[in-house]
Image (spheres, rainbow, N blue to C red):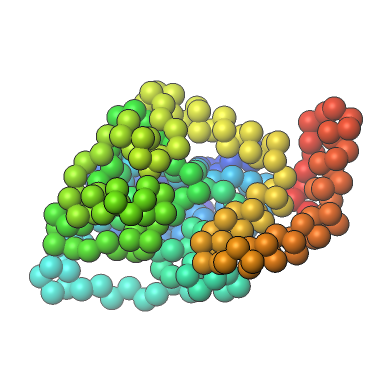
Amino acid sequence: MSFAEIDYKVTGHVAIVTLNRPEQLNAWTAVMGREVRKAMEMAAADDHVRVIVLTGAGRGFCSGADMKLLSGISTGGGSTEAADAPFDANSRSDFQRKNTYFPAIPKPIIAAVNGPCAGLGMCFALFCDMRFAADNAVFTTAFARRGLIAEHGMSWTLPRLIGMSAATDLLLSGRKVAADEALRLKLVDRVYPAADLMPAVLAYAKDLAELSSPRSLRVMKKQLWDTQMQTLNEAMDVADHEMALSFKSDDFKEGVKHFMEKRAPAFTGR
């Protein structure tokens, strides 16, 4: 399938979704949003794909919503886009909203933040399961400096990553945060020299795809996101249920067998 504002390719067991408006620092548009959703649907449905990487073309990750879109809204144009159907109607309702569906995707998503990451682009980065950044990446919430508010759940995601006080600072000030500070704040998980970012991200994704059970990745991702709305007792009940199912799975049998035979695993995801 061809896309206008993103690129999509699969290498090995890893799908790479690239925002592709480099001259606009990959500013987000309605077309891009629809294409990212389609690419994520393709990756989720492809049994060969086990890990997804989201990145940007050129020198930026995503500079936020396209200013033409914001300008149209500010002059009364508004938005007429219909809401998307839930990515997974069986997922928590929290993850069925237009821009909150990444947690419902049954495969880990790694954001490879290769440059400026702002506004709506940062919202999507925070809904990824991990964030690896180039050393020249810069982050900003930007909303307060545009007369806006914390959109698309950022008031929920950001404090869970960096704490309430730090999140308040970044949201109210809209200031820029360089990669080294982002790492200290735990906004990102790892920082690499810019030239090394994609090779490092793809090597990590390859390890996940080849050495970890796809079934385990799928179940644990769901546990991690759902647990944000659960009590300890509820999380324990889910874990007990899922562990019993794991013991019956092909991947559990293979996990024991390859360890005993001292060879690489051949997981199937079942």
Tell me if I can see residue 30 in this picture.
no
Spot occupied by residue 45 in the image (x, y as percentages of width and height)? 62, 58
Position of 244 compared to 125: left or right? right
Which of 51/175 is in front?
175
Q: Quadrant of residue 23?
A: top left
Q: Residue furthest left?
A: 75
Pick the residue in front: 117 or 31: 117
For residue 86, above or below residue 69: below
Q: Is residue 75 left or right of residue 63?
A: left
- Rendered image quadrant of residue 135: top left
Q: Residue at x 86, y 57 (%)?
A: 248
Residue 33 lies, with reference to residue 51, above or below; the image says below
Residue at 63% across, 47% down = 49
Horizontal placement of 151 versus 157: left or right?
A: left
Q: Quadrant of the C terminus?
A: bottom right
Residue 93: give x, y in percent of width and height.
Answer: 50, 74
